[in-house]
Amino acid sequence: MKKLLIAIISLLFAVTVNAQNRFPKPDFESGYQYPDITYQVPHETAWITVDIILLVLLMSIVAWATLKKRTHKPVVAVSIISVAYFGFFRSGCVCSIGSVQNIALALADDTYILPLSVLLFFILPVLFAFLFGRVFCAGVCPMGALQELVNLKNYKLSKTVTAMLRMTPWIYLIFAILYAVTRSSFIICRFDPFIGIFRMGGDLGLILFGALLLVAAVFTGRPFCRFLCPYGALLSLFAQVSIWKVQITKRPCINCELCHNACPVDAIKPPYDNKIKETRIKGVKRIVNYFIVFLPLMIFAGAVLMRSISSNLSRANKDVRLYDMVVQHESAPQDILSLELEAFYGQGGTIEALAEIYNGIQKDFRLYSTFAGALIGLVTGFTLIGLSVKRTRKQYEIDHANCVACGRCFEYCPQNSLKQNEL
């Protein structure tokens, strides 16, 4: 109903404006001044205010449920509300995930005006992650909530495969920032796999991809959140050092393995008896070699590789593509022009002015691609080092960086059941 009213009002507004342009008002010689006429349109600011209030409220409920009460049921209720409101009612456009691109562009371009609502949707989940862990991911994010609601089984992947796949969100985040700061594309919004589902229409390929992710989510926990979501990767940094961390139980762990089996995102590390016995000095030397030799080498290799392909990456920018089309047309004129070329020549564009823009974009891409490659090398290096460094654990421990605070483990822990029985 809301969308229908917006469409009707917008249509009436457009028709009215067009009618005014087609039939100019008479010009009175008496000096009569026409009164200013304003047209009422839907007040989007009110909806944005509701969005922000609901965002804070739902994250607070998840934090209370997981840290204070250690219960899963409120998280399920929050997931249903989030999917219904942020997903289907708001059409998936109230998106903290996509706000990463706006923030990156605002930091790189002083002329870009960052909407306050976008800033809040970016910073509030980050703040909650620093305080309470990834409570936004638990069920407030409609994408994560939708996957949580359809999950029935938890088939686990090997540690190596999981670690390598968890590199993907970081690489996705780096490319999203690269294309945002160069004003080329907002690829997170462009390739959102769930937006077509929430809007019940759109690009067929993305809808099918989103459907495949949901099918996969039935059998393994949150494949998008774990292996694709760039915002989740960012939140994991703050969740790892959060002030108040999720605990499965306050009682001693009895290593029953139930919490490990129940975790849909494989964020509970099992006990591990490190059989590789080495002296402390030898272990320290090995770690030092990783960080002094191996890691800088990976960073350098990534920077060189990305800089070498920066020209190819720049073709995502519309002005670069236009320059290529103009150069091709100037060398081999065509009778039928594309819409882009018609617009370019129709506006009196010159190849000299376009070449100046092109060179500026290429310079930006060389610079930002170098930094992006260095970050990719850093992520790759840390991942490989993490696979080779193993720490002895005596009991099950939560990996707070990857824990999405869904609370499923609480109900499976017998120590929590013992507490309820005693009460």
Image (tube, helix red, strand yellow):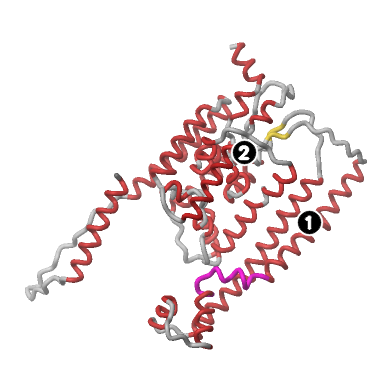
Residue at point 29%, 49% (across, down)? 4
**Where residue 226 sits in the image (x, y, percent)?**
62, 44
In percent of the image, x 52 and y 48: which residue is there? 210
Tag 1, which secondary structure? helix
Label 1 Cα crowd, 10 Å radius (few <14 / some 14-19 / many 20+):
many
Q: Is residue 9 visible?
A: yes
Q: What is the residue that sits farthest to the top in this orientation?
A: 422
Residue 183, image x, y percentages = 52, 66
Is 344 inside the magenta-drawn segment?
no
Does 87 sit left or right of 173 as displayed?
left
Is 311 in the magenta? yes
Q: Position of residue 321 (x, y in %)?
A: 52, 74
Boundaries of the magenta span: 309-320
Kind of residue at badge 2: Thr
Nearest the eye: 94 or 208:
208
Residues 13 and 226: in front is 226
**Image label count:** 2
Relative to 335, 73 lies left or right? right
Q: Which residue is mark 2?
A: 220
Which amino acid is tagged 1?
Leu
In which quarter of the view is residue 361 placed?
Answer: bottom right
Is residue 245 at all visible to an observer of this figure? no
Question: CA gap, disc 2 to disc 1?
Answer: 32 Å
Of the image marks 2 and 1, the number of the one nearer the N terminus: 2
Question: Which residue is at the front of the view, 45 or 8?
Answer: 8
Position of residue 229 relative to residue 355, above or below, is above
Counting from the top left corner in percent of width and height, residue 244 is at: 62, 34
Q: Which residue is mark 1?
A: 295
Q: Residue furthest left?
A: 30
Question: Which element type, helix, strand or loop, lies under badge 2?
Answer: loop
| 251 relative to 318, above or below | above
Q: Residue at x 89, y 39 (%)?
A: 276
